[in-house]
Amino acid sequence: IWEELKAKAKKTLEDDEKSAIYARRKIEVESVFGHIKGNRSFRRFSLRGLGKVHTEFGIVALAHNLLKVAGIRLAAFLQKQAHKKAGRKTLRFFTQPFYFGDLSDSPFFLF
């Protein structure tokens, strides 16, 4: 039985379309498990039983996804702040500073 399954798996991987899917799996799925094991230090389950293990891993996956979303939102916020600082220009006219960076968000900004 083992040899038949092994031959079937080899035949499946020889198909170009399925081998492309398998190659993507290495990047998309296995890196997540590596990140959870390596960076989050999750090496073993604390509970016994399939249902409890399923729940525990659900919590670990939820924490991973929430931290990922928080990182994406933080990066977007920092990029927006850097963009605001870079867009703020000082125009000196009669030695009086005018800041146009804050006005660009206004609906009445005409420039």
Image (cartoon, rainbow, N blue to C red):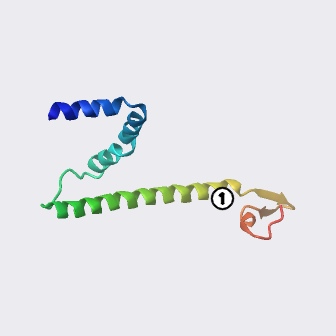
Q: What is the quadrant of residue 17 in the picture?
A: top left
Q: Residue at (35%, 57%) from the top-left corner? A: 64
- Left or right of 8? Residue 75 is right
Secondary structure under the numbered disc 1 in the rendered image: helix
Q: What is the quadrant of residue 28 in the picture?
A: top left
- Left or right of 57? Residue 96 is right
In the picture of the structure, the residue carrying the numbered disc 1 is 84
Pinpoint residue 48: horizontal percent, then vertical percent.
12, 60
Q: Is residue 14 above or below residue 44?
A: above
Q: Residue at (25%, 51%) from the top-left corner? A: 41
Pinpoint residue 97: horizontal percent, then vertical percent.
78, 62
Pinpoint residue 3: horizontal percent, then vertical percent.
17, 30
Q: Residue furthest right?
A: 94
Q: Residue at (74%, 56%) from the top-left corner? A: 89
Within 10 angstroms of label 1, few (less than 14), some, or many (20 or more) residues? some
Q: What is the quadrant of residue 90 in the picture?
A: bottom right
Pinpoint residue 39: horizontal percent, then vertical percent.
31, 49
- Left or right of 46? Residue 37 is right
Which quadrant would the N terminus be assigned to in this image? Answer: top left
Q: Amino acid at mark 1?
A: Lys
Which quadrant would the C terminus be assigned to in this image? Answer: bottom right
